[in-house]
Image: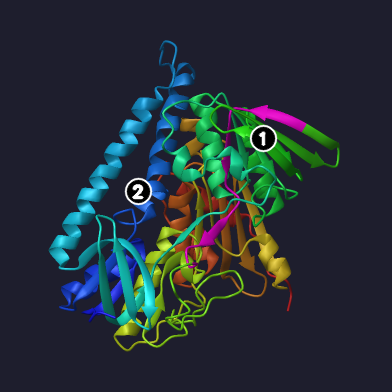
Amino acid sequence: MAEPERFQTVILGSGQGGKLLAWHLAKMGRRTAVVERQWVGGSCPAVACMPSKNEIWSARVGYLSRHAAAFGAVNGAIKTDMAKVLGRKRAMVDREVAFHLDAYKKSGAELIMGSGHFVAPNTVEVQLNDGGTRLLAGDQIVLNVGTHAAIPEIAGLADVRPLTHVEALELDYVPPHLVVLGGGYVGLEMAQAYRRFGSEVTVIEPGPQILGREDADVAAAVQDLLREEGVTFLCATQVLGVQGQSGRKVTLTMRSAEGDRAIAASDILVAVGRIPNTAGIGLDKAGVELDNRGYVRVNEWLQATAPDVWAIGECAGSPQFTHVSVDDFRIVRDNMAGGQRSKLDRLMPYCLFTDPPLARIGLSEGDAQRQGIAARVARLPMKAVLRTEATDETQGFMKVLVAQDDDRILGFTMLGAEAGEVMAAVQMAMLAKAPYPMVRDAVIAHLTYAEGLGPLLSNVGERSPA
């Protein structure tokens, strides 16, 4: 083996947590290399979070334009120009690439575009994208390799070349009929966007409800609002086989309690889950163990089983959100410096970017019941929030869980306009361990959606007698 180039830190993958760590370490004077197969900056700015929200916003603008007459704005026929939608998204991605390249240059971290695999502990061979190889050795190794879309083992599915979110965000046409496999976050965001672009959309979910981790009332409310826009849902439905070619014509055979049936569509999008990118990169040679799902086995400090190896983000089994990867960066940064910052007991925010969005922090009702935690539950329909009198955004509701034996806020869920922003206010109160009356009685600006927290918390019942 040739003598490797020596780095103090080698990071596989340029996702959110990895790049932040690279820039931090390099600015501290540590010689740092980042190996990235394809996307400068990782998937979030290139093919996931930011591009999807970019196109979702384009779909929302079209939707509002079609309904502008209700607000006194008279317009003509509105149609979608997917070439312009795609061009707007690509321009954003180009700006992000330029930003990231500049950040690498300013930090001093070296970005190496190629595919890395371990050939020995702490030693990575990189097949460079422009040809040739490099051999890197790091005193510390950080795994930030992410995940990719799972393609379920359904007869014929792989052969029809289905879309994942990556390909769906590169479409320059409006599919006449898009079938979405999976009623989770990605599937529902794309389903609503393409319905608003003009596609007929059918969502097929094998479970009894969409959003299987959410409370039943939340899932039902999301399904109702999307159904009102024309999205068709087939829950508790198993796809038996698929024929054809996505982009032309596909035929799906399905089974449900009503029996077997078939539907035809033009395109099929698979959004049923994620698989870690840990196979085929030589982790066994690095002494890094995986769990039974293929994720890097880490402790609460995000250390892998091999010495001086850490893992960040989705490949470490962390919740699949960019903001979690950012916090993973903070954990690894501090622990590399001798700290003991833990991933346990994080107050994790969730946000689904449908329109209106769904946001949740802390416990859901189901979580509390499963954990045997007694809680008082209060609800408020969004139509009771005064802001909606001005905007007509009356869909959805707020829901809060308060501890039965004290006044701690245990959880908050909101389906409604600006839900993510309102959730952040509740999150700050929960982090500060503020009793709910403090939030209830706060002077919140009128006329905002957050103003609804006052009447919501006024609905909390009295504590149970000791």
Q: Secondary structure at mark 1?
A: strand
Residue at position x 39%, y 47% in the image: 47
Task: Find the distance from the CA under tag 2 to the CA under tag 1.
Answer: 30 Å
Residue 18, horizontal then vertical, whole percent: 33, 67
User: Which region of the structure is painted magenta?
Assistant: 262-279
**Residue at far front of view:** 1
Secondary structure, magenta segment, majority class:
strand
Find residue 162 and report its horizontal and vertical position in percent: 56, 40
Residue nearer the viewer, 51 or 229: 51
Q: Is residue 75 left or right of residue 126?
A: right
The mark closer to the camera, 2 or 1, is 1
**What is the quadrant of residue 274 in the picture?**
bottom right
Q: Which residue is mark 2?
A: 46
| Position of residue 55 measured from the top left corner of the image (x, y, whole percent) | 41, 36
The disc labelled 2 sits on which kind of residue?
Ala
Q: Residue 204 shows which numbered tag?
A: none
